[in-house]
Image: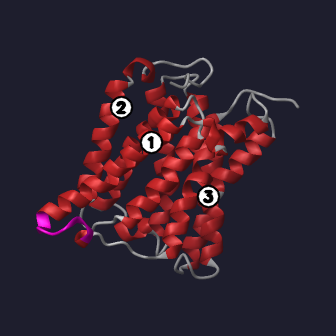
Amino acid sequence: MWRCRPRPLALMLAVIAWSWGWWALAVASGGHWLAFPTVAFTVLGMLGPLLVTIAFVGAGAWDAPAGAFWRDTLDPRRVAARWYGVALVLLVLLAGVPVVVASLRAGAAPWQVIEPTGAAAFLLVGALAGMVEEPAWRGYAQLALQRRIPVLLAALVVGLFWVAWHLPLFLIEGTYQASLGIGSEGFWTFVLALLAGSVVYAWLLGQAGGAAVIAVVYHGVGNVLRELWAVAGMERVELLVEVAIAVALVAVGWHWLRRTLDSGRSPAR
């Protein structure tokens, strides 16, 4: 099959065009995201990263066989178990530190300050988000961009597109983003957390030797864990933890984060 060099910027723009188009219809419908027809438009928009990546890779806009791309992206056996352990430790820190801080402030046990929504829809969407989003953001865009620019810069570029992709969700009733409100402190905390988080994803991707399944698992498990361990008013603390993790990983991995990788991948350790 004819293949060409990856086109990460074209892919990310296509993802935004697809998702924003459907989400514009969701906003125009004026309904809750779980009410018909808004739910159909919302879900179609959410599927944008996965569907666009399927189209690009299937059309040959990737310089390896499609089967190899999807094995790296969805097969958990492509990553050594120790890196799943590292990812879990990072997620426990990210979700757990706000719980501990809230517990100390309230003088209560940690389980007494947790306020999960209990909404099955949020848990399901959160769990599936990694499989839907990460083939595009990390599996394709991050790996392709870091062939041309340093890994850290590639992570920030992907992070900016990742932020842009989420913006219409702030206008759809019932979404987590809509509960924050555009321009609020929660909005800016969300934006900065995505940018810092994009650096963490890039570091994990590098340790996994470029197998994006580590990002898929990290994203999905992280969403569920943070939903189950949700604590109101701890957004600043969570952001500080995210930034601290990102800064620590930059310090640890600076020797390759500042490099441009010829193959887009780094060897697994």
Of circles 1 and 3, the one toward us is: 1
Q: Tags 2 and 1 in contact by the CB under 8 Å rule?
A: no
Give the SS element for disc 2.
helix
Q: Amino acid at mark 2?
A: Leu
Is residue 140 visible in the rendered image? The answer is: no
Quarter residue 180 falls in: bottom left
Q: Tags 3 and 2 in contact by the CB under 8 Å rule?
A: no
Give x and y (percent) for residue 217: 54, 49
Residue at which label 3 appears: 19
Residue at which label 2 appears: 249
Is residue 91 visible in the rendered image? The answer is: yes
- Direction from residue 130 to residue 47 in the image, left or right: right
Give x and y (percent) for residue 127: 53, 60
Image: 11 above or below 230: above
Give x and y (percent) for residue 12: 60, 43
Mark 1 surroundings within 10 Å by alpha-carbon count, few (fewer than 14), some (14 through 19), many (20 or more): few
Given the current orientation, which residue lies at the most extreme right position? 1
Marks 3 and 2, how far apart at CA: 31 Å
Give x and y (percent) for residue 193: 36, 49
The stretch in magenta equals 105-111
Name the N-terminal-most of marks 2 and 1.
1
Q: Amino acid at mark 1?
A: Gly
Residue at which label 1 appears: 85
Image: 187 above or below 200: below
Mark 3 surroundings within 10 Å by alpha-carbon count, few (fewer than 14), some (14 through 19), many (20 or more): many
Q: Amino acid at mark 3?
A: Ser
